[in-house]
Amino acid sequence: MTAVLARMTVLIAALGVSAPAAAAQPGDVYAGKTLRVIVGLEAGGTVDTLARAFAVHLRKHIPGNPAIVIQNMPGAGGWGATNYLHERAAPDGLTILYGPWDPLGQALGDQGLRARYENFEYLGGTGDIRVNYARTDLVPGGLKTPRDIAKADNVILGALNSTDISGLLPHLALDVLGVKHKMIVGYRGGNDVFLAMQRGEVGFHSTSISTFRSRNFGFIRSGQGIGIAYLVPVDRNGGYEKSQYVTEMPAYPDLYKEIHGKLPSGPAWDALNWLTNQTGEMTYVGLAPRGTPAAAVAALRKGFAGASNDTAFIKETMTRNGVPFSYIGIERGQAIFRSLADVSPDVLRTLRASIGANH
């Protein structure tokens, strides 16, 4: 862990310029303090970029305006950082985690994830839209439209680990469509997978719409890549809400209907839709160790809510990505964590079999 801890990037100077601290008030828990925000993925990736942008506004809204340090702790697809927060981080309010969570890892009881999300102090969550995209050379003559993905064969996916949503969501999406593929695990982050995709080692991947429109923009504009579909939760009656912000690719149910003439169904679809429901509403979470003082938790929660709804942060994300991030409050976030205990045994069996087929 010593080598991991050395991977620290300090934002104190930058944050001090962009958000001057207000005069400390009596009872300001964080006055004169430094808050360490752990990001469990590599620097330069989707989550790291979001965390750094968010931290600027987070500082403004935490009473006492602490300096903020972002520390990258990549390893095991983010599990290393989650386990560290659970097992080693002091519950003093000065160390928190921000990044994607792994509902499937917990639901399956994977031994690599030694923490349970409901045992952390939930600080706030962020919702995003997940999209699948592909190299256009997956089929002879190239992918001209998203529906051409049905012609592909032996597609290679890249993922951090077997339950990483950036690999598992596209794996399930291709499985439901009936496209043969293989998932390769062991990448250090989404940026690492994207580099492999640019080299031609990976042909299909999932990312957030914000990253698709920023980091991946040149790749798509050059014609090397194409958006295939964005994921939306579908209710029991087959209803779903299309995003008003995503126009460059169809919603996944619409893509399926275009290819197969009907809505998707079956065990693989039920598993994909469950995972989309879990991660689509709440993609990233802020967590503190259990036992963190109540005053610190309250201040951090106030900071997360304030930063998420800060008009400057919203304007920045709309300007950069053309889509806002949604804020997931305390009651809803905690309810999502508790709902992991209610996942259907049939869905879990399908997911276990699906993961096993990729080992």
Image: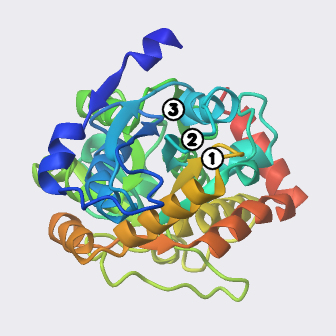
Q: What amino acid type is highlighted by mark number 2?
A: Asp
- Residue at (71, 59) in percent of width and height: 271
| Position of residue 269 measured from the top left corner of the image (x, y, whole percent) | 68, 64
Q: Are marks 1 and 2 in contact (CB under 8 Å)?
A: yes
Q: Which mark is residue 102?
A: 1
**Quick check: 184 above or below 246?**
above
Q: CA distance from mark 1 to mark 2?
A: 7 Å
- Residue at (24, 49) in percent of width and height: 225
Circle 3 — which element?
A: loop
**Crowding near the residue tagged with mark 3, few <14, some 14–19, many ≥20 C-alpha atoms within 10 Å:** many
First in residue order: circle 1 vs circle 2? 1
* Residue nearest the observer in this picture, 134 or 211: 211
| Position of residue 36 measured from the top left corner of the image (x, y, whole percent) | 42, 38
Q: Which mark is residue 164?
A: 2
| Position of residue 14 measured from the top left corner of the image (x, y, whole percent) | 16, 43
Q: Are marks 2 and 3 in contact (CB under 8 Å)?
A: yes
